[in-house]
Structure formats: C-alpha cells, structure tokens
Image: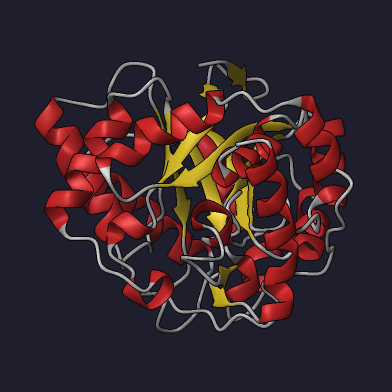
Amino acid sequence: MDKTRIKNSKIQISKLSFGTSALGDMPDTYGYRVNEGRARETINAIFDSACNLIDTSRNYGFGNAEKRIGQVIQERGGLPENFVISTKLDRNMKTQKFDAARARKSIEESLEALKVDRIGLLHLHDPEHCKDINEITSPNGSLAELFKMKEEGLAETVGLAMGKTELMLEIIKDWPFDAIINHNRFTLLNRNADELFDYAYSNNISIINAAPYASGVLAKGTGKSRLIAYSEATDQELEPVKKIEEICDKYNVPLPAAALQFSLNDKRISSTLVGVTKPKRVNETIELANCIIPNEAWEEINQLPYTTHDVEASRQYKPG
C-alpha cells in the first residue's frame, strides 16, 4: 500500500484508511447496530491489513469506538508497528462547550480509552457544532490547546476534522495544521470541498477525504440504499447515482470501486477514509481500490454533472 508523509513529521499514512464511527455502535446515524464482538473482529482485520491508518473520535458511540480499539490494542500487546491512530478532541456533547479545559479532558479520555501514551494524528473535531466558536479560536481556546498538546508530545501531528468547508478554510488559514479530514464533500456526486482541497494541497497540509461513498448509496447502489450524507435522498437526488450505475454496468465496474478510486486518484488527497463494520469489508475495500476501471468508463463518468452545495446543510445531527 502506497504511503505519503505528513509534513515535517515521521508519520506516513496509507492511501487507503479505515474509519470506526459505526464500530462505536451509532444506530441513530447509520440505522443499524454493531455489537462489541463484531466491532473488535473488524478492528483486528484493520490492524492485520496493508493499510496503516485507523480513524476514530472521542465521541463516536459516546466513547465506545475508542474503547473497543483500546481493548484490541491491549489484547495484541500494543499498537501494531508503524500503525497510526487518528483521533479527535471533541466538545462536551451535553453542553456543546469546547474550551481549552474541555479539549484537555478529551485527550485524557482518549489516551485512557485507547491504551496509548500519545496520538499519531490528533484533530480538533466539528467546531461548527460547538456552543461558541470563540471558545475554539481565541488565543487561549481549544485550538491553542491542540497545538500545545503537539508541543508536549501528546500528538505527533495535528489536524482539523469537520464538515462545513467555508468555516474550515477560514480556520486552516489561521493555524499551522499538518492535516485535515473532510467528509461527504468530495465524491462522485459532490465537489463542495474543491476550493478547500486546493488551498490545503498548495500549503502542504495533508488531506484525508472521508466518506467517498456519500455515506451509503455509492457503496450499495440505489437498489439497496437511499442514504446520501446520512439522510434519505429524494428520487431526484438519486438520479445522478443511477447515471453512474448505468456507466458502471456498461463497463462491468463495481459502483463502489468507481466511487473509491475517484478519491484515491486525486493527487491532492493523501488518504481516502472508508468506514467498515465487518471484518470481510477490509479486504473487500482493498480489492475495490485495486479494481481495474477502463479509461472509457472514467471518460463517461467525468462528463457527468455534480453538485457543489453543502450536502449536509439540512442534516439533523445525531450523536448516537
């Protein structure tokens, strides 16, 4: 698996990486449950794969995702060699408070849950959902605390993980981030993150593009899913997917292979982050990444229209 280096660090991350939000058991978001046994089997499969980046968050499943990863790390006798944990500082989910004190509490909780003494890639998470953005961006706010953690050695590299690209672009222009994670805004269906990615790439900020399947429909197809950006899509919103499906059927290409490789093939993107909830999905995803897609198929796919609006603008955020 090809890897790219995060700037000014020894950290190298694989072009394909795996996310664990659903492994924390988040039925309100995904519509299904994932029990502890299945989650831990999947985490082991990730650790045994050719990829070396696993992404999680303090608040995925209200701490369950990190806890389950930590249990597997403990059982294995430590984090696998050269493996990178990406996790996130999170706001208080009850009060939405996200000041420096909350950021410090969040990293302490993460280190305890994950059974590690430092984080390879630590992000500040979802500032758009916090109570007061000034708690984050002020000189003594949670962002300053994030960079202090890097100075202290608690994090080797630091990033910003969020959705709204306009606010994200504004923030990364003011702070020396090593990496960013954005989700659902750069897919076959939507290019809302284009300007953000251009800026990050030109400023040597590593880009991790999450949710290349648009949170469901580009993985399962319109016959099995109507989910786009965690919300049920209208018939009109599904029409572009059906056009992609027609091209994929014409060239005998799996729909998720096209969706995944669209992100993998973009030179700006250091790693494409895919959520998995079953052990077999790990190798299946790697196979999709290596699937041969004819140039003729890409020519037709690249001619299709796409949207640039914020695909999650009307999403009702559910933390569980």
Q: What is the x, y in percent for residue 199?
A: 86, 42
Tell me how the rendering is colored.
Answer: secondary structure
Q: What is the x, y in percent for residue 319?
A: 42, 75
Asked where in the image residue 269 lies, by quadrant, the reply is top right
| Residue in the image at 67% along x and 70% along y | 238
Q: What is the x, y in percent for residue 143?
A: 62, 55
Rendered-image quadrant of the C terminus: bottom left
Q: Nearer the viewer, residue 234 or 212?
A: 234
- Asked if one can make out residue 82 in the rendered structure from this viewpoint, the answer is yes
Q: Nearer the viewer, residue 75 or 33?
A: 33
- Asked if one can make out residue 153 in the rendered structure from this viewpoint, the answer is no
Q: What is the x, y in percent for residue 142?
A: 57, 60
| Residue in the image at 73% along x and 69% along y | 239
Q: Is residue 60 above or below residue 177?
A: below
Q: Is residue 320 above or below residue 68?
A: below
Q: Furthest-front residue in view? A: 250
Asked where in the image residue 301 lies, by quadrant, the reply is top right
Question: How many numbered marks appear?
Answer: 0
Q: Is residue 98 above or below residue 297?
A: below
On the rendered structure, is 26 left or right of 52?
A: left
Q: Nearer the viewer, residue 87 or 143?
A: 87
Q: Is residue 135 above or below residue 113?
A: below
On the rendered structure, is 269 left or right of 282?
A: right
| Residue in the image at 54% along x and 48% along y | 123
On the rendered structure, is 307 left or right of 260?
A: right
| Residue in the image at 18% along x and 41% along y | 41
